[in-house]
Amino acid sequence: MRRWRGLVVDLGPTVLIGGLGLAEIAGTGLGSSFPGPPAIQVAFLLAAVAPLCWRRRRPFLVFGWVAIVTGAWEALFFRSRQPQPPLEAFLAIIVVAYTLGAHSRGRSFWIAVGFMIAGIASDPLTGGTAENDLAAWIFIAAAFAIGVGLRRQRDLAASLRDAMRRLEVEREEHAQLSVELERSRIARELHDVVAHALSVMVVQAGAERRVLGAGGEATAEVLSTIERVGREALNETRAILGMLRQEQSSPPLAPQPGLGDLPALVDQLRATGLEVEVEMAGHPKPLPPGVDLTAYRIVQEALTNVLKHAPGARAKVRVGFAQDQFELRISDDGANPPPTAPGGHGLIGIRERVTMHGGRFSAGPTEHRGFEVIAMLPLRAT
């Protein structure tokens, strides 16, 4: 499709102007006069319009050629401008002047301007005068200026497209970096949870093995194996995940929070002026440590978004317990909902946490007003 469109643009002026000129030379056109042998007039006409097919590839060469041919044509047959030079010569110059303006940049632009000035200065050589040809050169200069304007518009559109592509790439890279940073943060937090669980397992297995009496050799061997494997797992966990601690200047001193710390979080946000309502549904059940931490972070991030992006809004936190999962639903009635990805990278972190535990997550504007974050998390560690 693009190829055919290019052919039409290249061949169109040649066919139209050439066909009009041949019709007028044959006496069936608009009435332009062509003194002299018709064969010579046809030769000049074709020499002037045929190169227009290559005007976009060689604008300066075609402009120079058309200017020379039309100048010689007018000097030989229309030197006194009586009869009036043919319209086809004028149209050919208009077309190449527009093309010259549309394809000249930087130094080539000033070369094109020089071509235009040279054409005006050489006009007396063809028998023209400033008074007679002023209107024609105004039209030619206008065609050149229109070409320059459209070329600048195309350049601006192309630069905007390039800028949009670069911004899209940077946005995707920034979103990916946010995901990686959030995963590192999750790993740092889970390091404490996993290390604590392994430590408890190893200590309890060792203690139970020591208090076994006679006849418990088989059980002692099993406990010894549990203790040994647990210590190895603990060492591996500290060796691998502990490297993430190098990014922190000092390890956190407070224990990792959970839903039990939700009242303190709500009180802290209420102190900033945010109205928060908390609703508990179902019978609360103990949560795995990692899930408990994830639930707290979800509520913390969602309420922080409300505070930042919907000032003056009221927020509601609903924690619903079912048989094998529980639901977190944080909503607000603000007019300006928090930005979704890629603008809001906090939501990316929430999605990563929920997905890590095999849960489901959704976030978006509500039907009437405000924003809502919903997370479904399992009650058993996956």
Image: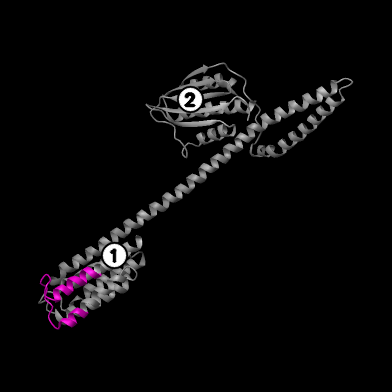
Q: Inspect the image, locate mark 2, and give the three-letter code of the amino acid beneath it.
A: Ile
Residue placed under numbered mark 2 in the picture = 330
Local crowd size for mark 1, using a 10 Å CA cut-off: few (<14), some (14–19), many (≥20)? few
The magenta segment is: 14-43
Q: Which mark is residue 378?
A: none
Distance, label 1 to label 2, CA atoms, is 60 Å
**Residue 84, image x and y in percent?**
12, 74
**Mark 2: secondary structure:** strand
Q: Residue at x 63, y 35 (%)?
A: 187
Q: To which quarter of the image does residue 211 belong?
A: top right
Q: Position of residue 352 (x, y in %)?
A: 56, 35
Residue 233 against residue 67 in the figure, above or below: above
Rendering quarter of residue 46: bottom left
Residue linked to disc 1 = 8
Residue 61 location, x and y as percent?
A: 32, 74
Instruction: Identify which residue is drawn at 23% across, 64% down.
Output: 143
Q: Is 306 on the left-hand or right-hand side of 27?
A: right
Whether residue 100 is visible here, answered yes or no, is no
Q: Which residue is outermost to the right?
A: 214
Q: Where is the C terminus found, in terms of image quarters?
A: top right
State left or right for residue 48 relative to residue 79: right
Which residue appears farthest toward the top when viewing the image? 283
Quick check: 193 left or right of 103? right
Give amino acid for label 1: Val
Q: Residue at x 14, y 73 (%)?
A: 24
